[in-house]
Amino acid sequence: MSSSSSSSASKNTAVKGAFKDLHQENQVFQRRAWIAIVIVIVMLLGLVSRMLFLQIVQYDVHTTRSENNRIHVEAVAPTRGLIYDRNGILLADNRPSYSLTIVREQVKDLQNVLKRISHILKLDEEHQELIHERAAQRRRPFEPTLLLDQLTEAQIAQIAVNRHRLPGVEVEAQLSRHYPQKDYMAHVLGYVGRINEEELNQLDRTRYSGTHYIGKTGVEKFYETDLHGEVGYQKVETNARGRVLRVLEYQPPQPGKNLVLHLDSQLQQVAHEALQGRRGAIVAVEPATGGILAMVSTPSFDPNLFVGGIDSKTYRDLRRDPDLPLFNRSIRGQYPPASTVKPFMALAGLEYDVVKRDTSIYDPGYYRLPNDDRQYRNWKRSGHGKVDLRLSVVYSNDTYFYNLAYNLGIDNIFDFMSKFGFGEQTSVDVDHATSGLMPSREWKRNERRQPWFPGETLSIGIGQGYWLATPLQLASATAILANRGHWVQARLLHSADGKELPRYFQDTPADVKLRDASNWDYVFDVMKDVVHSPRGTARGISHGLQYLMAGKTGTAQVRSIRQGETYDETKIPERHRDHALFVAFAPLENPQIAIAVVVENGGGGSTTAAPIARKVVDAYLLPKLATQPTAVAQQEAVPASQGQALGRGA
């Protein structure tokens, strides 16, 4: 058995040896090795050739790309121009503040970073929505997007501690708009606010690169181009994370122009406080230049709330306030001018030779059109008896002006009143001022599809009916009257960087010419009697007056009264009571200020609006009289108890 086993093993070894060819295996290995070497060499050659192509052939291209990734051009926002009043008092300045910004190109997971910011700063839902909305706003590549502004010191510290967790997020120092006068100047100056998506699409993005704010209302909006300035730039080198390493080139921005306004901030404050928070408006104009000395609307608001972004609750409260603090009554409030237009109507009657200075009528307390039983009542139900043109203005007699308006006709009234700017927006640089309404036959035909009726002319004769005017229009018309027809357009801007900006000034309307120039002096004397005569409706403010004032009271109906009904304001809701109005200019011989006062639902113009005007005019003129005591004629005080009792309609 052992010999057979050995024999079998030998045979198996011989068979295996017969199948294994070492030479062939060596050749196969060599071929494979050479193939592998060739592949490696080809790959190396491909790699080398690619490197040569990138580094030699495309050297310029990739060098430029590399530099563009490492070097960025950043916009440098200009400093916004300052705003001063006529006495050099600062009305709008810039204060340092800190904002949180993000560069989206440096953030891989934007939503996650925003969540971290919300958690770190413990933002409420409103601010969380705000930063998500702002982060999604379109901007130029690598331009920082504003997330939050007006950061507190605690918030800045929290961001600094967690800086490693917030790629692309930076705290930037900048200048923020501030209004020292707050609610005193809110409506006239307006405010700046953050640029929204709609505004961004309309703006020159190059000019507003790096700028987060724009004028929204008032002077800030109208003179935005001048206040903004010109953007600068800086070329900076950054690391892979986008952090600035050094500034390679710097082109400084051009700051905005500093504006000087005609406004007198002290007078503005006096006017604001004189209204005592009541709904109303005061506009004072310098007749010589048309410069607006004061333009107040109350109640008001703090414009600083809008600069940093007002919260929804505060804004909602302002919007829902029934007294409408956001509404600028001085330029957008439209009121029947009431009896304040009677001096203008008197001039029109003299100009068209409808009445003479001594033309008189008998006033039984009402007026009737021919063949009409309706009674158009005088404010004094018993009437004033026999009145001429002078007494009709001094008493503010409605019956006389019903008759005058009827004889003038609506066409002559419209033509003459339009010369003083009624129904027109003639101010130079007052943003969003309305034009009021000076009705005419054509207007009613187009708007109401109806003819003009004689009774409507009577209402126009006492400044009621369709006639509407803003406080700015009343003040402007009074200034033109004080100038004896010489036209000046109401304007806010005095100069910009010490120079005028004529591109904003419109063509001035033609002066008002009268056939008999002495009629100006006659109407002035009549308006003086309104204030200084014992019978004048505004005699109550003449006590202790140190200068001569020409004025006219007015009381505008808010709620119509039926025939035979007696007006009793104690039985009427406060918001349905009459508006109180007063217009005036002073001093009489050399007018330096023209003023219009409107107090909504204030009652009689003589008892409410006239005393307010006296306070404002005193604040402006008395300091001047103290240095020039002989510049204005002195007037003895008239006791308020003299003359007839004041009445509604005055």
Image (cartoon, rainbow, N blue to C red):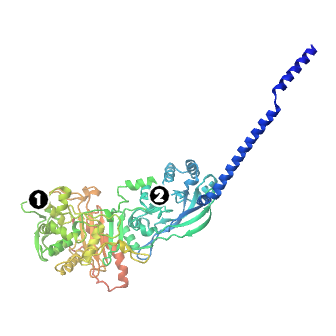
For image coordinates 12% across by 77% down, the residue present is 358
Q: Nearer the viewer, mark 1 or mark 2?
A: 2
Residue 490: x %, y % from top left = 32, 72
Q: In which quarter of the image is the N terminus?
A: top right
Disc number placed over residue 217 in the picture, else none: none
In the foreground, 481 or 219 = 219
For image coordinates 26% across by 72% down, the residue present is 477
Residue 497: x %, y % from top left = 44, 76
Which residue, as the protein is rendered here, is positioned at the far bottom? 630
For image coordinates 78% across by 36% down, the residue present is 27
The amino acid marked with disc number 1 is: Arg
Q: Inspect this view and state whether residue 339 appears.
A: yes
Q: Name the residue under label 2.
A: 309
Callout 2: SS: loop
Callout 1: SS: loop
In the foreground, 182 or 394 = 182
For image coordinates 14% across by 77% down, the residue present is 357
Residue 574: x %, y % from top left = 29, 57
Q: Name the residue under label 1.
A: 374
Q: Residues within 10 Å of mark 2 (few under 14, many from 20)?
A: some
* In this picture, residue 208 sits left or right of residue 449: right
**Quarter residue 156 falls in:** bottom right
The amino acid marked with disc number 2 is: Gly
